[in-house]
Amino acid sequence: MTRTASRKDESTTMSTVHVMMNEANKDPFQSVNRKAGLQIWTINKLQMVPVPARSFGNFFEGDCYLVLHMSKNLGAADIHYWIGNTSSQDEQGAAAVYVTQLDEHLGGAPVQHREVQGYESPRFRSYFKNGVIYKKGGVASGFDHVDTNAYNVLRLLHVKGRKHVTATEVDAAWSSFNTGDIFLLDMGKVIVQWNGEKSNRREKLKATLLAQEIRDRERGGRAQIGLVEGADERDSPELMKSMTEVLGQRSGRIKAAVPDDDSRQPHNAAVRLYHVYDVSGNLVVQEVATQPLTQDLLQSSDCYILDNGGSSVMVWKGKHASKEERRGALNRAVGYIKAKNYPASTSVEVMCEGGESAMFKHLFKEWRDKNQTQGFGTTHSVGKIAKVEQVKFDVMELHARPELAAQQRMVDDASGDVKVWRIENLELAEVNPRTYGQFYGGDCYLVLYTYRVSNREQHILYMWQGRRATKDEVTACAYQAVHLDNKYKGAPVQVRVVMGKEPRHFLAIFKGKLIIFEGGTGRPGAVNPVGGPRLFQVRGTNELNTKATEVQARASSLNSNDVFLLKTDHSCYLWYGKGCNGDERMMGKAISDLLSKQDKQGVMEGQEPAEFWVALGGKAPYASDKSLQREEPLHSPRLFECSNQTGQFRMTEVADFAQSDLDEEDVMLLDTWEEIFLWVGISANPSETKEAWNCAREYLRTHPAGRDQDTPIIFLKQGFEPPTFTGWFSAWDPHKWSAGKSYEELKKELNSDASFAQINIDLNKTTLNSGGGGYRAPGGPMSPPPFYKSHFGDSSPHATSPTAPRPSSTAPGKHVDPELLINKSASELPPGVDPCYKENFLSDADFELLLGVDRLEFQRLAMWRQKELKKKAGLF
């Protein structure tokens, strides 16, 4: 399929923007540094203007921004080009050009992202942990930016989202409210959080954290936060009075909840790869392939567009593509979106060869990075099954380095205790320890592995499902796993294992004695039919990674890279492929002694006797190409939040994830490619847990890379995480869960502060309304502050209203040198000075100087006073 779209008008517009930019900004990247962290610029009069760190997370709807995130990981970088809803075409064009130039300035390695207001990528949102605020105004809209660190503020913020919230400035009127969302009425000195009765606890918590962020970042900690539950407004009369003063009397009922937009949900369309190029000013889009994609489709001399089912568009730039092609990659993606009639908000990523994003790699069936290694060395794949080279593990090293445990999929050295049950008549039956390691395809088993870390018992419960087991037995296996899990109070990590797809640790716990029979049963007294020759494939180099698997007794089952045991009624052959080494031959001989007590005849590939081929039904072609041995695809892990708290079950990806992203009220899915973990928070509801199991299977079934449907799924609960899970997270803190605060705890704390911690200073002083050094759009004066009153209940004996004078506990006119007060402890103060009210001993001039010059001391004083007042009230 080939599509074309005219680009002449667009090229003319971009050329004009280039000329204007060159005239306006001679050196736009002089403020760029390569240190890890975040840097943001706004586009003002076609110039890049740095945004100070205290204003990060605030975006004006009339502007465009460039956001550069430098990772600690080997200098990896992402450049985001953010488009405000009311920004001008010139600003958007300038931002697009700056993105390309910044990419070149940084050596072409960063991944470029196009972000549209309200449709930002999870990665972009992850930079602003407490949320993103959309503000009205901006240079292009003709509005002036509001100065931060000032109290002349009156705005209503509509808060949406659970993982990474956004707050959009809306009209300050009751008509903007609805029962399903949360609203912050910001009145400068007072921030009132109004919670719709249909909003959930997690949304309330995130909104509270955002309110605290505004208080601390924009007001230096000097504003108060009050909480109003929309369903119980009468419980907060003072706060409702403050809201009414500003918003007026409410007439009628609050609007009903607005359903969440599901436009972010992934589409079901196939993933397609296109070659994109120009012909006489027209954009030509030629389809190359559809899913599953392979890496060899990408040629270094060209650029490609990958269409992820319409949910996102990715551009790949070959390292040998022309400079013009590489520079025009972002514009081509935008042109492609227009040609396909996709929404303008469609996500766009642009990356160069060698700097591909994790999402891009996950869309390919196989991906191999240059010189890639895994764990202690290179990992190989032979045929369809990974051939893993492992070494003896130092158990203490695995516990000390969870990242090593995660990469090797080993929680320990497999020296713990093992107990095995088989499902018989839908009940658990203990397996004789002498037969541990023998698994029959007609059975289901539960394997409980117990080990100790820091004198604490840990458990892994494997649910092994035979390929020939009945559906009732598979169901009973899952039911009995729940029963055992309850018996151990939810501590075991549950791992679903499909026959033939055993995880590495499962192999290790049977110490090189793992044998998997294609069919039959291991039940006592059962007679398994034996008809003709049987062939077993032996794989492994030591007792940690060896297993014997029964395969069809035919010549085509052989593989030159492995050892095979052929057992007949009269003889037994141990066949060594040309590609196997001495360790593999040794393990093959050891495990064959368990399968048969007969004498084994060693047979080298190419020297087989005629009887050998007769037993296999005749000689036939088999896998013998050494090219089968290649590096196993390495994929970066991905984390998803699984939740139904919005009314429907959703999976949302979490970019640059950390332990703090594990939500206690949800189920999280961690995909490490070789395994899938389902992590259940302590407050997750049963419906989410059940849906998560189904969703994990659906995730594998619909994965565009054609994933193995039998990939192990590991089920674990909060507080019982093994190192194979925690190792994917940097700086895992096992005590984190007891340190976090719930919404109810934060609410109680804020209500206490509202009653006893009002700062007893007139914050409406001219110095505060006009100063602060906060960020504002370059050019143009501030608009005049709105006039309003705020009422806030306070039972403190020293509470003041906005118009009240500063209270004084000393005689009028008695002032002290500021140097004797500032940064002094209570014991260092002059006699008679109350440490709670040091400002009462300052003259007006000295007081204003303190606020204007030493705001840090003022903030420290305010926090110290809150603590002292709580002590007096008996709350601390």
Image: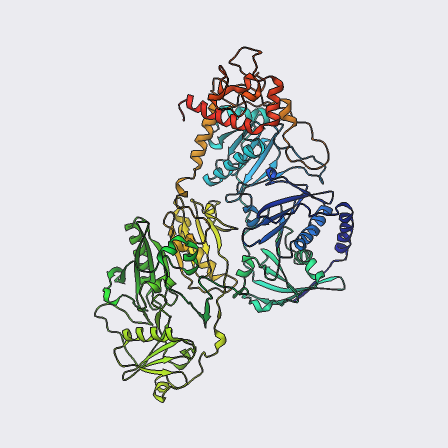
* Drawn side of residue 746 relative to residue 343, left or right: left
Picture quarter containing residue 553?
bottom left
* Residue lying furthest top: 811
- Please tell me which residue lies in front, 273 or 402: 402
Rendered location of residue 552, percent (x, y):
37, 77
Determine if residue 312 is in view: yes
- Please tell me which residue lies in front, 577 or 816: 816
Picture quarter containing residue 749?
top left
Q: Quadrant of the N terminus?
A: bottom right
Rendered location of residue 847, percent (x, y):
59, 21
193 lies above or below 797: below
Rendered location of residue 292, percent (x, y):
54, 66
- Please tell me which residue lies in front, 160 or 614: 614
- Residue drawn at point x = 42 percent, y = 34 percent: 745
Rendered location of residue 769, percent (x, y):
64, 26
Colouring convention used in this rendered image of the protein: rainbow
